[in-house]
Image: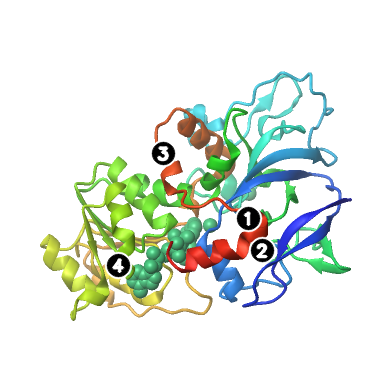
Amino acid sequence: VIRCGAAVAWAVGKPLSVEEVEVAPPKAGEVHVKIVATGICCTDEHLLEGCLPDADFPVIPGHEGAGIVKSVGEGVTSVKPDNTHTHKYTPRIQLSNQVLLGSTFRACPERGTQHGMCIIPGDKVIPLCLPQCGECSFCLNPKSNYCLKSHVSEPQNLLPDKTSRFTCKGKRIHHFLWVSTFAEYTGILEYAVAKIDAAAPLDKVCLLGCEFSTGYGTAINTTKAPTCTVFGIGGVGLSVVMGCKAAAASRIIAVDINKDKFARAKELGATDGISPWDFKKPIEEVLTEMTGYGVDDSFEVIGHADTMAAALASCNINTGICVMVGVPASGSAISVDPMLLLCGHTWKGTLLRGWKMRDFIPKLVSSYLEKKFNSDLLLTHTLPIAKVNEGFELLCAGK
Ligand code: NAD
Ligand code: ZN
Ligand code: ZN
């Protein structure tokens, strides 16, 4: 058992409290990760506000971290935790033809095990808030990233054996998205970590665990068209702006009620910044007038039903694509004119851009190291975990 610090949310709406927690040793198929750095994503704030379905308290939040494997449970190293093992993990994505065929991991010739499983203490990893078991029918489907052995398909804030690895003051503490990165040490399923390049700076690449991958990836995956609009330019929305720019969009309109955000959005590629509060007419009408027939692609990165409907209505009625990225509060409903869809619009949502996380995160880290993008531009503040509540205050104040 490890005793370490963690930020615990005891109840909805209460500030986090940094406590000493006990972390039970990893069971079979699990790893212990020493978290070196973690980001704050708005989904953590949704959790603290009580907006997520099936969230149980007390809980250790955090789902966007990076760390080092401290120990592994039975079956994880598969052979033995020998540090002499020199086999280099090759991220699957580099074998793109095989990825397309849908086989997720290939055999490791040295260990007689699977590549993705060659995790040993000392490895740098990014915990995956969307796991990839590599075996379920969704993992085997090249088009899907919705692992059936995940907290998404089986909602719970305990690990799959219905127990928690965390206790504090004699109480069971729940996991969040099976990763809980606001703990100094966290217990994670082996198939919910991605091993990354040993050269990666963990304080920087932690952002690839959620916000940057989602935003940037969604945009480069969607945008092939000249005009885009991004509703909500927090960390994820700014990543969408960067992705639209990388995809060579010529007009990128940032929509936010916080106009202080526009300067940064423009530095990252936005061409216009508009606030719905500056207009009497609905923002979708403003966007349609600005672009003639509506934007080609719109991204909703806030999580409100009304901005989701506005993002859909802002697109070109025939060829427009609207992607919902923001996480709505549980129980939200949207009312939509069906004619919008009948006319050809595409309306879709995304979970982590559709990446199969265990395959793609190592590749994304390599691209970061090759300076193919600069996610460091999203970093605004660095704080010790003791000031985690200050971090949430900054997020909520739009800083
Ligand atoms: P954030 O709080 O940093 O940014 C939200 C932005 O929206 C802010 O700039 C805010 O001023 C703006 N905003 C709020 N209400 C608005 C309104 N009515 N009109 C215009 N702008 C408004 O949040 P974030 O961390 O960037 O996350 C954004 C959303 O993405 C959250 O809902 C989060 O849960 C979700 N998310 C989804 C995924 C996914 O895989 N789909 C992954 C990560 C985050
Ligand atoms: Zn997130
Ligand atoms: Zn799976």
Q: Confirm or deny contact between disc 4 and disc 1 (CB under 8 A).
A: no
x and y percentages locating residue 88 in the rendered image = 65, 22
CA–CA distance in space, label 1 to label 2 = 8 Å
Please tell me whether residue 282 is drawn above or below residue 289 in the rendered image. below
Residue in the foreground of this view, choosing between 285 and 151: 285
Q: Amino acid at mark 4?
A: Ala
Q: Residues within 10 Å of mark 3 (few under 14, many from 20)?
A: some
Mark sitting on residue 311: 4
Query: Is residue 185 found left or right of 142 in the rendered image?
Result: right
Query: Is residue 118 found left or right of 211 in the rendered image?
Result: right
Where does label 2 land, which residue?
A: 154
Label 4 or label 2, whichever comes before in sequence order: 2
Disc 1 C-beta below 8 A from ligand 3: yes
Q: Residues within 10 Å of mark 1 (few under 14, many from 20)?
A: some
Where does label 1 land, which residue?
A: 148
Q: Residue at x 81, y 59 (%)?
A: 20
**Residue 88 showing in the rendered view:** yes
x and y percentages locating residue 389 in the rendered image = 61, 65
Label 3 or label 2, whichever comes before in sequence order: 2
Disc 2 C-beta below 8 A from ligand 3: no
**Residue 152 showing in the rendered view:** no
Where does label 3 land, which residue?
A: 374
For the C terminus, give its image quadrant. bottom left
* Secondary structure state at the residue bearing disc 3: loop
